Amino acid sequence: MAKESDASAPTSLREPVIRLRGAELRFGPRVLWHDLDLDVAPGEFVAVLGPNGTGKTSLLKVLLGQNTLSAGTAEVGGRQVHSGNPAIGYIPQQRGIDPHTPMRGRDLVRMGIDGHKWGMGLLSRGRKKKVDELLAAVGATDYADAPAGTVSGGELQRLRVAQSLANDPSVLLCDEPLLSLDMHHQKVVAALLNEQRVEPDTAVVFVTHEINPILPYVDRILYIVGGHFLVGTPAEVMTTESLSRLYGSPVEVVQVGGRLVVVGGEEECVDHHHMPDEEFDLDAAVNR
Amino acid sequence: MSITEIFGNLFTFEDYGELVGLLANSLIAAALLGVVGGLISVFVMARDIPFAVHGVSELSFAGAAFALLIGFDVVAGSIVGSIVAALIIGVGGAKASEKNAIIGVLMPFGLGLAILFLALYDGRAANKFGLLTGQIVAITPSQILTLIICALAVLVVLVIVWRPLLFSSLDPEVARAKGVPVSLLTIVFMLTLGLAVALSVQVVGVLLVLALLITPAAAATQLSASPVWVPVLSVIFAVTASVGGILIALGSPVVPISPFVTTISFLIYVVCRLVGGRRMKSLHRRRAARAAKDHNTSQPATP
């Protein structure tokens, strides 16, 4: 019932960095999605769309080795998914940081390099140089020494981009990184993220409610609705016909001022900035 | 009684040098506890769990009171009590809200037990009071040895887990994604916190543990967000309070140590808070300036 399109067509002939085969994720009696086949090629940008609670964040957690598939296989970089894979960079859902939290912008980036190693790691010249380079690349040098709790949302996401790319990952997993940013900064951060990952040919899996800021960079979309899914290019997926079939009810995709808006689904693709943690909480609750 | 008479009763600095000599061991122990408290408090702030410190200290109190009742070693009793509490809190609550509920449930229970044990105890009243207000001057050389060993154990563990513990405290999602054993480190940290609480109870007593395990880093984070300066300042503040408190208390035959320790700790915080308020204002001004610059150099956002 779920498979609506041939998902396993990579856009290049190189070995895929992500390979899902017959993947099924089930929490107790509830099946989030099943029979999911997906190959993501190096350098490919895949957006994951869908209403809350359809298992978008859970998909990222499968790739991170934190959720276990109930059936099928998942590989990242040719290996079975496992926790702590250094080939993966990760941008989590944004949450507020207290202004007195003892962490500066540069510390956030630095932890992406060596935060997982034991010991205190007091002295390392190479590390400081690397942190400075990353900060400069995302234009965060100005506020690198400010406490991370005192920078703006857009500034924090620049730091997150730098942190996620710190170890030159081959895959970048992003969980709603544009949430809580205004439209201007959504565009700026999306462009920055794309620019920073193009040359190292990093593949991106980008969970989002809002396709428009990343539409220029997206190669394929994985759209999940209630256990059904659809994979294809934006032109194939973001049409009234495709989405109506996927939702199983009449849905209209309209262009408003150069923006794509889905009307009549369980939710529209705009105006979801007020419920950032709903899906995460739901999944966590089911998980327990 | 005039103010000077009260002051005269509170302080008699006769034979001060001799007293300091007699209490050299206590001073060393207090300094070590300051170092432990200063470092632990950095993680208490980073994880935002000051309430947990209070919860652990109440069960530490119950453990010590029980040890007193059955004639067991009081230091060992308080260590057992606080480690049990730390483990329950560390294992029980994944989320901060769950954690707070568990602590809130645990705290009155621990306090109730402690009151029961003390009510049943018919020994010297000073022993009871010492649990509440600290008694490092009165403890035996063998207890001081226990304290020093435990303090060193805490320091060794902290040095080993420092980076991943800080990562998992400040940025748990990314730390987990990077393979940091976040849940395991939570338990390791709660164990070291339990030990640190039990040790601090000896100096400032159950009721005032917060002065050594929260205030130092709370003061330090007013001044800096650097991962080097915050621990350094926090340790300096905690040692100043613990050692300074004892040195002042030596001149007073009637007042116990804890009010001096907590007052020094509090004053340090007040000063840092005043300086830190100016720092925050300037940080917000700079952020506003960056936002204005960003706005001017970029295309105006489309509505």
Image: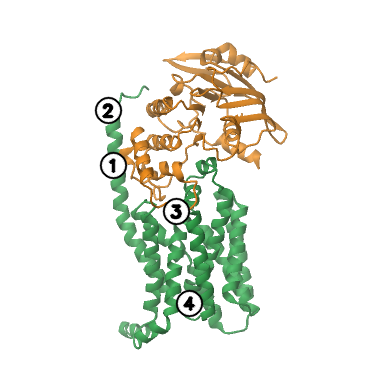
Chain colours: A orange, B green
Q: What element carries label 4?
A: loop
Q: Is residue A55 visible?
A: no
Q: Is mark 3 on a helix, strand or loop?
A: loop
Do dots 3 and 2 share one subunit?
no
Q: Above or below — where is A186 with respect to B33?
A: above
On whether disc 4 and disc 3 are found on a single subunit, the reply is no
> In the rendered structure, are the residues bearing label 2 and label 4 in contact, judged by CB atoms less than 8 Å apart?
no
Residue B87 percent across, percent down from the top left: 61, 58
Residue matched to label 4 = B136
Residue B89 appears at what percent x and percent y?
59, 56
Marks 1/2 same chain? yes
- Give me the disc on residue B297: 2
**Picture coordinates of residue B241 (x, y %)?**
39, 69
Number of the front mark, 4 or 1? 4
CA gap, disc 2 and disc 4? 62 Å
Instruction: Answer whether labels 4 and 1 touch (C-beta < 8 Å).
Output: no
Where does label 1 land, which residue? Answer: B286
In-front residue for pair A226/A233: A233
In the foreground, A57 or A8: A8
Which chain letter matches label 2? B
Q: Distance between the residues labelled 1 and 2?
A: 17 Å
